[in-house]
């Protein structure tokens, strides 16, 4: 198993861009084996544990992060995707329901590859006038949020906290289900803040953005990276050395 780790690839990281350095992982495995041979099992175990923790980030060398934009109809999801991507990837229209399917856009933020997923607008309980196409789009949007690494939960002008715009129709429109209780994988975004009524204040922790004025776009981009890769901020030394980057390496470790 130890030889297998060496054989299937090596990498090391410095900074968020994860540059690859040949031999880094193999040398770390050799060091761990030397520690074991010298009877320093506690140190060897700690080194293996560090590699396992670092693999959460290393695996993203071959599989980009998935960030889903979810929210009510006409909340500005498509415009925000275009602003983060720096080009018009999604069709933007004042007509509700322009986005009916999942639309993926590959971007790079601070060296990290990220797939932005633009989704159909979510509606309240009244779906009587929704077409089968719109219902299918809503179903896919909800499924995409469940599989996402991070969800940007959007509200439009006068953003309301969970209980208002933060509620989603369940698949099939039979009722409501709240936004995810795992707030570590969600960022609340008050989109279209240039249209907010004077004096309106979004809930604490919400990032105000406007694709018209550019307000908050840079702040949101930085927040996405901080939320996806907290290791860079809470344990920066974790990514300073060898990092496993395949599922097989992780299993062998």
Image (cartoon, rainbow, N blue to C red):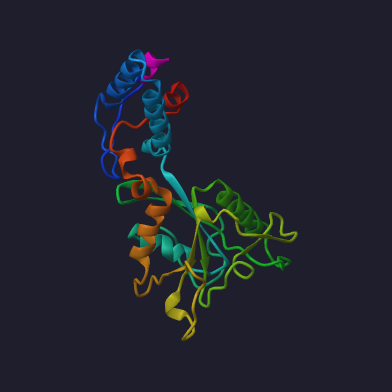
Q: Which residue is drawn at 56% across and 58% down?
A: 100
Say if 166 sits above or below 251 in the image. Answer: below
**Where residue 72 sits in the image (x, y, percent)?**
58, 66
**Where residue 251 sits in the image (x, y, percent)?**
47, 24
Say if 212 sits above or below 104 in the image. Answer: below
Q: Is residue 83 in the magenta section?
A: no
Residue with the most extreme bottom position? 198
Total labels drawn? 0
Q: Left or right of 252: which side holds 146?
A: right
The image quadrant of residue 25 is top left
Q: Which residue is drawn at 71% across and 65% down?
A: 127
Say if 104 sits above or below 33 in the image. Answer: below
Q: Quadrant of the N terminus?
A: top left
Q: Residue at x 56, y 69 (%)?
A: 96
Q: Left or right of 27: which side holds 66?
A: right
Q: Give the range drawn in magenta.
A: 1-5
| Overall secondary structure of the magenta section | helix
Closest to the observer, 102 or 55: 55
Closest to the observer, 208 or 237: 237
Residue 167 visible in the snapshot: yes
The image quadrant of residue 128 is bottom right
The image quadrant of residue 208 is bottom left
**Where residue 219 sits in the image (x, y, percent)?**
36, 64
Say if 132 sits above or below 242 in the image. Answer: below
Q: In which quarter of the image is the C terminus?
A: top left
Q: Left or right of 74: which side holds 29?
A: left
Residue 88 visible in the snapshot: no
Q: Residue at x 38, y 20 (%)?
A: 5
**Where residue 236 sits in the image (x, y, percent)?**
32, 44
């Amino acid at each position: 198993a130890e030889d297998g780790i060496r054989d299937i690839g090596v990498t090391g990281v410095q900074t968020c861009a994860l540059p690859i350095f040949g031999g880094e992982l193999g040398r770390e495995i050799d060091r761990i084996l030397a520690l074991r041979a010298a009877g320093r099992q506690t140190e060897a175990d700690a080194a293996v544990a560090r590699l396992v923790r670092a693999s959460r980030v290393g695996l993203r060398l071959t599989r980009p992060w998935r960030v889903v934009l979810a929210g009510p109809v006409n909340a500005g999801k498509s415009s925000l995707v275009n602003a983060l991507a720096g080009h018009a990837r999604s069709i933007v229209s004042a007509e509700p329901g322009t986005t009916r399917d999942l639309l993926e856009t590959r971007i790079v933020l601070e060296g990290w590859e990220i797939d932005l997923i633009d989704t159909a607008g979510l509606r309240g309980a009244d779906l009587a006038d929704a077409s089968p196409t719109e219902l299918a789009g809503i179903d896919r949007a909800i499924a995409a949020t469940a599989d996402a690494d991070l969800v940007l939960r959007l509200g439009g002008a006068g953003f309301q906290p969970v209980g208002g715009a933060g509620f989603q129709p369940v698949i099939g429109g039979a009722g409501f289900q709240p936004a995810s209780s795992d707030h570590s994988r969600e960022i609340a975004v008050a989109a279209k803040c240039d249209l907010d009524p004077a004096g309106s204040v979004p809930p604490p922790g919400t990032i105000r953005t406007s694709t018209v004025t550019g307000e908050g776009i840079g702040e949101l981009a930085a927040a996405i990276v901080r939320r996806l890769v907290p290791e860079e901020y809470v344990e920066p030394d974790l990514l300073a050395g060898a990092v496993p980057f395949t599922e097989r390496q992780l299993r062998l470790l």
